[in-house]
Amino acid sequence: MPEERRPSSFCPKRKRTFQSATKKHLIQKLANEVFAEKGYGETTISRIAKKANISKGNIYGYFRNKEKLLFSIPKERMEIFLYAQIESQSENEMDV
């Protein structure tokens, strides 16, 4: 029976999701640095893309515009903080 061939670009959904989340986080992290250095007015998607070594289109795949990207940064940081709090609480409950 012939072996099933997958396209060379095949990537399991879980892996793509992780890669997407990682790339999105990288964009947010580097955008945060550019916003801090240049301010909102002088920051461009092109500058962020150059710093991240990706295309502008790649950034637009995650964020509709510069404003959405800017406001996603505090939201993402809050999600990380809340996740850490939940993990900490779970660990404390297991110790009791």
Image (cartoon, rainbow, N blue to C red):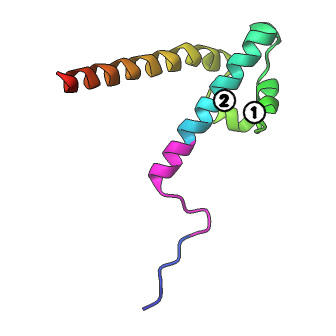
Q: Nearer the viewer, residue 7 or 21?
A: 21
Amino acid carrying label 2: it is Ile
Q: Quadrant of the C terminus?
A: top left
SS of the residue under disc 1: helix
* Marks 2/1: CA–CA distance: 7 Å
Q: Are marks 2 and 1 in contact (CB under 8 Å)?
A: yes
Q: Is residue 96 above or below residue 21?
A: above
Judge the density around disc 1: few (<14), some (14-19), many (≥20) Cα neighbours within 10 Å.
some
Residue beneath the point at 21% across and 24% down: 95
Q: Is residue 14 magenta?
A: yes
- Reading the image, the residue beneath label 2 is 27
Q: Position of residue 51 (x, y in %)?
A: 79, 29
Q: Position of residue 82 (x, y in %)?
A: 39, 17
Q: Nearer the viewer, residue 35 or 91?
A: 91
Q: Position of residue 42 (x, y in %)?
A: 83, 11
Query: Picture quarter containing residue 34?
Result: top right
Visible residue check, residue 48: yes
Question: What span is colored magenta in the figure?
Answer: 7-19
